[in-house]
Image (tube, helix red, strand yellow):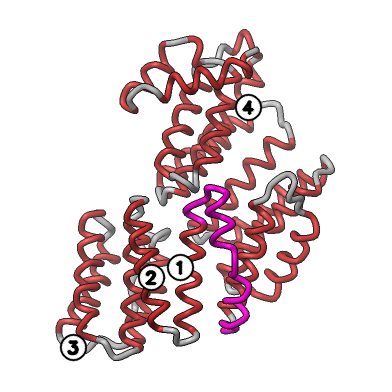
Amino acid sequence: LERADAPAHLEELLGHPRSQRATLVRNLKRFQTWGSCELLLSESYSRRFSNAEEGVDLAELAALAAECLDAAHYGEALVTDMRGLAYAHLANARRVASDLLGAEEAMSRAEELLEQGTGDPIHEARLFEMKSNLRSAQRRFPEALRASKRAEANYSLVGDQHQVGAALLQRAGVLLKMGEYPQAEVLLNRSLGLLDPQRDQREPLLARAGLAFLLNGVGRFADAQQALAGLHAAFSQLGDSLTALRLRWLEANTAAGLHEFSLAEELYREVQSGFAAAEIPYDVALVSLDLAVLYLEQGRTAEVKAIADEIVSVFLALQIHRETYAAAMLFRQAVETETVTLALAKRLAQYLREAQSNNGLAFRV
C-alpha cells in the first residue's frame, strides 16, 4: 500500500519549493514511509546523470525520510538497512555532482549503519559498488578495486550474473583510469557477456564506451571514433545527459588525436557549454584546458590567453585549494609572458585531473 501511494506523495512533495521540502518530510507522516524512501532513492539514482543537483536533493530527502522511519513499526534492523542504503545513495549522488568531501562524509555514515543492520549481501554489494565508484573518483585505486571485488563476490553469492557483469564493468573503469588497458579490455569483454540489456540498457552501452575510451587511450583514434558512433545519441535517449556529454568530450579528444582540429574545437565548445549549464565548473575548466592544448598544437597562442583567464576565474570562484590555484596562475603567467609550451599545458591538464581528488597535491613543472 505504501508503494502504491508513494508516487502521489512524491509528486506532492516536489510540487513545493525546494526550500520547504525537508521541513515537510520531517513533519508529515505520509513522507516517512518505507515506500516513500524506496521511491526517493530510485528517483535520485535514475536522475543522477540527467541532473546531478536534483539527484543530490532527492538523495538528501531520502536520507531524511529514512531517519524518520518508525523502527518500532518496521523493525530496528531493517530501518538501519534503509538508512544505510539512503546514505550510500547520497554519497553516490554527491560524487556525481563532484562533491567528493560530502560524498566521503555520507559514505562513512552508510558503512557505519549497514554494519549494524541485517547483513543482507545485496545491500552490502550495493554499498561496495558505490564505495568503489567513490574511491575511483578519489583516485584511491587499490581501495576501489577491492570494493569492486567484494561487490562481485556478493552478487556471485546470490547468483545474480547481470550484477556480476556490472561489477566487472566497474572494475574495468578503475583499471582504465590506472592505464591498465590489457586487464581492462578483458573485463570489459567479460562484462558484455554477462550484462542483460533487458534489465539495464545503460550498462552494456557503458561497456562499449569503455572500449572506445581504451582505444583512444592507446592512440587508436580512428578505431575509437568508430566505436563511439551512436553512443552519444543512445545515452541522450536514455536521459543520461551527463554521460552523453562526457562521450562528446571523448569524441573531441579523438578528433584532436586525428588532427581534425575544427571538429575537435566545435565539440570542446559544446562540452564546455554543457558542463556550464550543468553547473560543474571544475569540468568546465578541464575542458577549457583541453581546448588550450588544441590551440597550442596549432600555434594559436594568442587565443590561449582568454582560456587561461577563464581557468583562473573558475578556480577563484570555487575557492579551490592553494596548490591548484597556484598552478593555474603559473599557467596564466606563462601565457602572458609568451613562454607557455604544449608540454606545460598537458602537464597542467593531468595535474588538475589528479588534484580534483587530492587537495594536497603539488604541481611539478
* Residues tagged 4 and 3 counted as in contact (Cβ below 8 A): no
Q: Position of residue 364 (x, y in %)?
A: 34, 78
In space, the residues marked 3 and 1 are separated at their CA atoms by 28 Å
In space, the residues marked 2 and 4 are separated at their CA atoms by 43 Å
Q: Amino acid at mark 4?
A: Asp
For residue 81, which numbered disc appears in the image? 4
The earlier-in-sequence mark between 1 and 4 is 4
For residue 249, which numbered disc appears in the image? 1
| Magenta span contains residue 222 | yes
The earlier-in-sequence mark between 4 and 3 is 4
Dot 3 crowding, Cα within 10 Å, few <14, some 14–19, many 20+: few
The residue pinned by badge 3 equals 338
Please identify, in this view, whether the residue under mark 3 or under mark 1 is nearer the observer.
1
Q: Quadrant of residue 112?
A: top right
Q: Amino acid at mark 1?
A: Trp
In space, the residues marked 2 and 1 are separated at their CA atoms by 6 Å
In this rendering, position of residue 78 left or right of residue 282: right
Q: Position of residue 121 (x, y in %)?
A: 74, 36
